[in-house]
Image: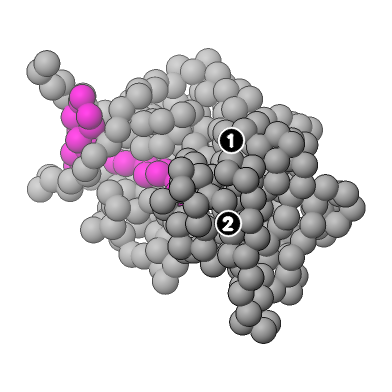
Amino acid sequence: MDRTTEQHDLVIVGAGPAGLAASIYATRAMLDSVTIEGAAMGGQISLTDEIENYPAVKSASGVELAQLMQEHAEGMGAHFAYDNIEAIKLLDDGTFSLQGGKTDYIARSVIYAGGAKPRLAGFEGEKEYTGRGVSYCATCDGMFYRNKEVFVVGGGNTACEEALFLAKFASKVTLVVRKDHVRAVPAIARQIEENERIEIRYLTSVVELKGNMAPTDIVFRNNETEETYSEHYDEGMFGVFVFVGYDPATKLVEDFVELSEDGAVITDDTMATKTAGLFCAGDIRRKPLRQVITAASDGAVAASSASHYLGAAVVA
């Protein structure tokens, strides 16, 4: 099949909260724009069972909130496309060429909201048993562990929230925290402590998983004494969920931006990068807080900045 080429004022890559908000504001600015998503609308929030901290939405699943955002954008006339962007190039005339799986896109400006991917914990057997005992999505895989034991690796907000969710299904949830405290906000930490199905093991790390088709043995390390110990289960009777942060998905733009020590894109307050016309928004950015509301804010600012950039380019 012959490839097609589309030309736009603005291409928004990624339809998480940042990309969806950007699509709304780009449409309001009457830009010829398209928002491209390669997986599920909503990005990482589509894997979240319950969101309770987005203003005016008392409680909703990530899928529901993403659907509301998309419907809002489409109702205003925003355009969406499902495609995988495989490469981004800066052309000699200052425009951008984006190579999709089936379409090429030419844009005068780009908002890259590629988000982040789950970070590996680093224990032996983690990659080997991914999808067969190791998971990074409680919403996706929690039901497989009904009446089974679950270990949650991590001590931040996400790990604690997912532990609470998994406690609805599992017979027991053990939160494995490498430090002597959890980093979740007090309200969530209190829920963890009060939940009878959840145990917290402080100063502990998972070292290794062993087994055949599915893990049967899990090896821990006491981070205070450096001693290791293992626990044995029947095959398929326990799972490990890893929530130790995310790595920004910067590969497509790394040649056009500056990166921080943790691999996030450095932007200014307008979401601009060192490359004129390229803006980054959402979890891919270096920022102190990664939440739905901050991603949506980034997207709104990025679209406004792109609009100003394009207007200035026309005047020039």
Give the residue number, with chain letter if any, for mark 1.
141
Q: Is residue 74 above or below residue 93?
A: above
Nearer to us in this view, 146 or 48 = 146
Nearer to us in this view, 11 or 132 = 132
Give the residue number, with chain letter if any, for mark 2.
217
Over which residues does the magenta segment extend? 94-118
Q: Nearer the viewer, mark 2 or mark 1?
A: 2
Residue 242 horizontal side relative to residue 61, left or right = left
Looking at the image, is mark 2 or mark 1 earlier in the sequence? 1
Magenta stretch contains residue 114: yes
Q: Residue at x 18, y 29 (%)?
A: 104
Q: Residue at x 39, y 22 (%)?
A: 80
Residue lying at the far bottom in this picture: please name it. Answer: 225
**Figure coloring:** one colour
Q: Position of residue 149 (x, y in %)?
A: 70, 46
Indicate the secondary structure of the residue bearing disc 1. Answer: helix
Q: What amino acid is labelled 1 in the image? A: Asp
Screen quadrant of the N terminus = top left
Screen quadrant of the C terminus = top left
Whether residue 171 is visible to the viewer of this picture, yes or no, is yes
